[in-house]
């Protein structure tokens, strides 16, 4: 699906919800009428589920309304399909139960079509109470902590004007989703919070992220296996690990990734800028047709990087070459400062070299002064146009 078609579908979805709500006088379901109390102590899990089921199963459009106040909420699954468009109007603060949990997700939306999540409210994962239990850097078989907001098979929907803070793990995760627009969202967690990706997606298409600020301890945006037609624009990232395609090649049965556009974004004091990463493993896939354009970086450690020997653990075998074929990647009008001496790094697979890497008008200065910046290349075939600083390595 072309990007224009995706955007048209999203606009139509928003119009459909508004029109339906107006025409049918959308019914408002107030969670306070279901025994939910904003005392900051009581677990309101049962009340929220009853309210959701009532809103979801009503005829026509419904609004699930969360008034201002602080609500404690245990793990919930808001399941569809619903009988009409549904708005989750979130104006309060939802707080997860403190400490680690046996569940994978805190708030999980499943099989929902035509949903609008908005309202200026906050989802507080209470991450500081659980981060010390994260040992995934040392244990490859670790049990991940809960995700703040998980969307499974959500389609033709929009998320806007909400905040996710201190997730125990990933803040917003999409799996098997289509035509979802995320805009004017804020993600906040400390730079040293472990595995707190901002927005992560897999096996999803037609996802648009725009006008969003992400400050966290892992990738600001992570685009994983099976993702296609993804548009990321006007996103501010920092602190964090940058905007990443991957990691890829870790699990058997992974799908290709293609059609990703990252434009008009800014990065401030991040570990990486724009990154493509794959494991050194024999699992095959294709990663292609990526555009990184009109990007500004401020004191970024690895502004432009392809890493096909990726491993976040303390011990990894890197004997095998990555079988992820990366091709057709364009970097255009990217500038700013690098906090390391290597501003451009392409460490590609010796078995499947990166192909058709195109760089146009790249300009980085050393934020520390000192020596001129460098580029580093391994197993890459590409072309350069316009001004190039540092000097290109192909």
Image: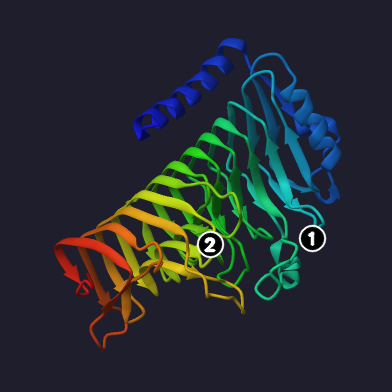
Residue at image location 55% in from the left, 48% down from the top: 201
The picture places residue 79, in percent across and down from the top left corner, at: 73, 32
For the C terminus, give its image quadrant. Answer: bottom left
Quickly name the residue at label 2: 282
| Residue 98, disc | 1
| Residue 374 in the image: above or below residue 352 | below
How far apart are labels 2 and 1 at the CA level? Answer: 40 Å
The picture places residue 367, in percent across and down from the top left corner, at: 31, 79
Rate crowding at label 2 as few (under 14), some (14 to 19) or many (20 or more) other CA atoms within 10 Å: some
The picture places residue 311, in percent across and down from the top left corner, at: 55, 71
The picture places residue 359, in percent across and down from the top left corner, at: 23, 60
Query: In terms of image quadrants, where is residue 307?
Result: bottom left
Residue at image location 70% in from the left, 42% down from the top: 108
Position of 172 with respect to 43 (left or right) is left
| Residue 128 in the image: above or below residue 16 | below
| Residue 111 in the image: above or below residue 327 | above
């Amino acid at each position: 699906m072309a990007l224009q078609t995706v955007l048209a579908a999203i606009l139509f979805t928003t119009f459909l919800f508004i029109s339906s709500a107006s025409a049918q006088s959308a019914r408002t379901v107030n969670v306070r009428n279901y025994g939910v109390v904003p005392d900051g102590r009581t677990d309101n899990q049962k009340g929220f589920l009853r309210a959701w089921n009532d809103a979801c199963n009503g005829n026509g459009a419904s609004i699930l309304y969360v008034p201002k106040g602080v609500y404690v909420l245990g793990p919930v699954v808001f399941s569809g399909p619903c009988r009409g468009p549904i708005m989750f109007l979130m104006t309060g603060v939802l707080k997860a139960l403190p400490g680690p949990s046996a569940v994978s997700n805190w708030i999980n939306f499943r099989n929902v079509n035509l949903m609008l999540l908005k309202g200026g409210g906050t989802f507080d994962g209470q991450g500081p109470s659980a981060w010390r239990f994260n040992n995934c850097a040392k244990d490859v078989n670790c049990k991940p902590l809960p995700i703040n907001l998980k969307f499974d098979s959500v389609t033709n929907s929009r998320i806007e004007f909400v905040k996710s803070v201190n997730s125990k793990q990933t803040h917003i995760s999409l799996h098997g989703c289509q035509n979802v627009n995320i805009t004017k969202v804020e993600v906040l967690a400390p730079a040293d919070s472990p595995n707190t990706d901002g927005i992560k997606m897999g096996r999803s298409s037609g996802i648009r992220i725009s006008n969003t600020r992400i400050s966290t301890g892992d990738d600001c945006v992570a685009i994983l296996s099976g993702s296609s037609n993804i548009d990321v624009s006007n996103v501010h990232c920092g602190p964090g690990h940058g905007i990443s395609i991957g990691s890829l090649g870790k699990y058997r049965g992974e799908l290709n990734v293609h059609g990703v556009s990252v434009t008009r974004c800014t990065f401030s004091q991040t570990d990486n800028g724009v990154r493509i990463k794959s494991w050194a493993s024999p699992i095959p896939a294709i990663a292609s047709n990526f555009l990184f354009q009109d990007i500004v970086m401020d004191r970024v450690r690895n502004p432009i990087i392809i890493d096909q020997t990726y491993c976040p653990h303390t011990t990894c075998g890197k004997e095998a070459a990555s079988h992820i074929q990366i091709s057709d990647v364009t970097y255009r009008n990217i500038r700013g400062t690098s906090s390391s001496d290597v501003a451009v790094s392409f460490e590609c697979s010796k078995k499947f070299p990166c192909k058709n890497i195109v760089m146009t008008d790249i300009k980085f200065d050393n934020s520390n002064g000192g020596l001129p910046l460098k580029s580093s290349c391994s197993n890459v075939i590409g072309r350069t146009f316009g001004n190039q600083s540092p000097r290109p390595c192909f």
